């Protein structure tokens, strides 16, 4: 009996070490999951239905979508980048009795297991001066930078959109969305 137990234990050890040593393309359920990393938050922050307003080269435009946080902790987006244009995180806020667009101080905070809407007339990613025209149907890539140092890449499809009649903070040198002014 003792011999059978030792043989079973040895076989189990060989099988375990054999699976652990296999790294090639197997999707065997016994393969251990990768260890958590600094990008764990990025793996659970998603951008649903992303789109960008089509616009002329040099004319400010914006990207929108829904940021979804499936983690147990708040996530802060501190900055964003795109090869298409320099970017700023923007919000709409009341100033002197009217709604104005301005940079969002402190970034966008997406609450634990919550979502945050980026929409025309609300928070958005402002493409300050696209190098080339963004035509309807174009795909524009973005990278969100999070407070923990991780990043979340996503791609948005360009759509025609007339705008939400936004005004700009007079102290911030911007032209209205869709304008060709510098």
Image (cartoon, rainbow, N blue to C red):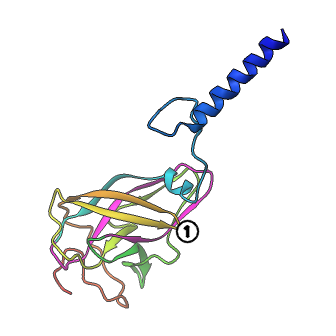
Q: Residues within 10 Å of mark 1 (few under 14, many from 20)?
A: some
Q: Quadrant of residue 76?
A: bottom right
> Does the magenta portion include 109?
no
Residue at 29% from the left image edge and 69% from the top image edge: 62
Residue carrying label 1 = 147
Farthest residue toward the bottom?
Answer: 171
Q: Nearer the viewer, residue 5 or 51?
A: 5
Q: Position of residue 105 (x, y in %)?
A: 50, 78
Looking at the picture, does residue 26 appear above or below residue 145? above
> Does the magenta portion include 67?
yes
Q: Which quarter of the figure is the N terminus placed in?
A: top right
Q: Which residues are magenta?
A: 56-82
Q: Position of residue 92 (x, y in %)?
A: 40, 73
Q: Nearer the viewer, residue 156 or 170?
A: 156
Residue at 58% from the left image edge and 51% from the top image edge: 71
Looking at the picture, does residue 26 appear above or below residue 109? above
Q: Nearer the viewer, residue 90 or 136?
A: 136
Farthest residue toward the front?
Answer: 3
Residue at 20% from the left image edge and 58% from the top image edge: 159
Looking at the picture, does residue 89 appear above or below residue 2? below
Question: Secondary structure beneath disc 1?
Answer: loop
Q: Nearer the viewer, residue 79 or 150?
A: 150
Residue at 60% from the left image edge and 31% from the top image edge: 18
Farthest residue toward the top?
Answer: 1
């Amino acid at each position: 009996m003792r011999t059978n137990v030792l043989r079973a234990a040895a076989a189990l050890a060989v099988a375990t070490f054999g699976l652990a040593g296999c790294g090639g393309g197997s999707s065997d359920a016994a393969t251990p999951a990768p260890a958590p990393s600094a990008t764990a938050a990025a793996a659970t922050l998603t951008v649903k239905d992303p789109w960008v307003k089509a616009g002329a080269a040099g004319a400010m435009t914006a990207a929108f979508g829904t940021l979804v946080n499936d983690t147990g902790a708040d996530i802060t987006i501190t900055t964003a980048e795109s090869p298409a244009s320099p970017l700023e995180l923007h919000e709409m806020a009341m100033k002197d009795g009217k709604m104005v667009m301005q940079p969002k101080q402190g970034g966008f905070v997406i609450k634990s297991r919550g979502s945050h809407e980026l929409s025309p007339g609300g928070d958005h990613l402002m493409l300050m001066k696209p190098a080339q025209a963004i035509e309807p149907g174009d795909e524009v890539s973005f990278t969100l930078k999070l407070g923990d140092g991780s990043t979340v890449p996503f791609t948005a499809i360009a759509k025609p959109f007339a705008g939400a009649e936004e005004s700009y903070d007079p102290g911030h040198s911007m032209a209205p969305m869709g304008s060709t002014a510098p």
